[in-house]
Amino acid sequence: MTKKRVVSGMRPTGRLHLGHLVGALDNWVALQRDYDCYYFVADWHALTSHFNDTTEIVGHALDNVADWIGCGIDPERSTIFVQSLVPEHAELYLLLQMVTPIPWLERVPTYKEIAEQLSDRDLSSIGFLGYPLLQTADVTIYDANVVPVGDDQVPHLELSREVVRRFNNVYGDVLVEPAAMLTPTPRLPGLDNRKMSKSYGNTIDLSDDAATVVKKVRQMYTDPKRVRADIPGTVEGNPVFLYHDAFNRNLEEVEDLKTRYREGRVGDVEVKTKLATAVNAVLEPIRQRRAEVLARPGYVRELVMEGSKKARAQAIETMTRVRDAVKLVY
Ligand code: TRP
């Protein structure tokens, strides 16, 4: 039996952090067992909001792929590639545009939300409006059955399905309707209890060394009413304990810390020191593999070149079928 196909991408807008690990990469790694996985760097998607600031995109792309491998994405099993190295994505995107009413894109909730969040940027472009449609091309060009995403991306997959249905209505059954697969992990707040985001500087990055992790954890936001260790504290929703739940594999230790925290019998220093140790235990093997990969000159670049070649062969096949269906055959 052939495996179902998974396609997912990440924008190369900066270093990857713990949010990427629990929100995507852990799941990407697990999916490799049962699916034929295609994972890619969505560099054109990075341009939709950063078109005037492109100098770092390629650097981030290669650095991100090193992190993927560090986390356990296996280039032998999964196809790792770069969106812009498979220009057929753009051709399919163009054809999808023909059947997509502009209001469908204006209605996608992220369109207004991101425009409000990034009010300092010029987001009046067609490229930004078309973001979820490009994403539709990204997955349908590989006949993706399943697209693992966070809940913020569900409306994009809904748009994808609507567009595919319309395309198939017009041209015959040529594209596969992709389904969202929700990543089952809780959202982690940033170190300061705001949304975790590189732009807030409140992340622990996968490439942070052990001492940096200790320092960052020490500065984490915690229950503000606990000005002394003997004041009972709140565990629920406390970022320090959300991180313990996410990363500390010593469940007994976590339970003990929670009990003593609630009763005012533990200092923040102990809770945070144990958290830093737990986070470093998770990150250490990732750091090591990442370092190995980066120690081989040109390795990551070659790997994405190879992966992109393989992805492109697949994309060209789909586009032959699509051109056939659209009757643009000369
Ligand atoms: N929009 C996704 C994000 O911001 C990135 C992305 C681009 C993507 N194309 C995709 C994800 C295709 C899944 C499938 O996270």
Image (cartoon, rainbow, N blue to C red):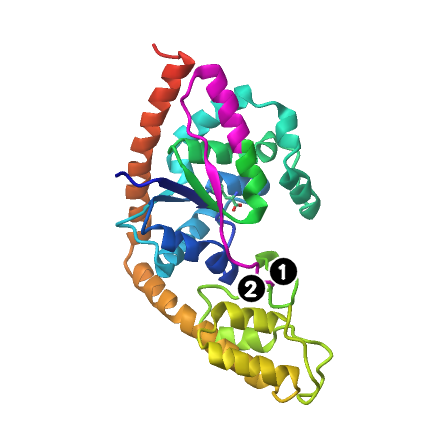
| Residue found 61% across the figure and 87% down from its top | 267
Is 85 drawn above or below residue 326 in the view shown? below
| Residue found 44% across the figure and 73% down from its top | 249
| Residue found 52% across the figure and 59% down from its top | 19
Is 29 drawn above or below residue 213 in the view shown? above
Residue neighbourhood size for the residue with mark 1, other residues' Cα within 10 Å, grouped as few (<14), some (14–19), many (≥20): few
Choose top left, top right, bottom left or bottom right for residue 235: bottom right
Q: Mark 1: which amino acid?
A: Tyr
C-alpha span from label 2 to label 1 = 8 Å
Is 29 drawn above or below residue 178 in the view shown? below
Q: Quadrant of the C terminus?
A: top left
Q: Mark 2: which amino acid?
A: Thr
| Residue found 37% across the figure and 55% down from its top | 30
Whether residue 244 can be seen here: yes
Pointer 2 residue: 203
Q: Residue 37: horizontal and vertical position, in percent?
A: 35, 44
Q: Residue 39: horizontal and vertical position, in percent?
A: 39, 45
Report helix, strand or loop for mark 2. loop
Choose top left, top right, bottom left or bottom right for residue 265: bottom right
As drawn, the label of residue 325 is none
The answer to whether the residue bearing label 1 lies less than 8 angstroms from the nearest atom of ligand 1 is no
Pointer 1 residue: 200
Q: Quadrant of the N terminus?
A: top left
**What residue range appears in magenta?**
160-189
Q: Residue 9: horizontal and vertical position, in percent?
A: 45, 44
Report helix, strand or loop for mark 1. helix
Is 15 drawn above or below residue 138 in the view shown? below
Left/right placement of residue 37 relative to residue 20 reads left
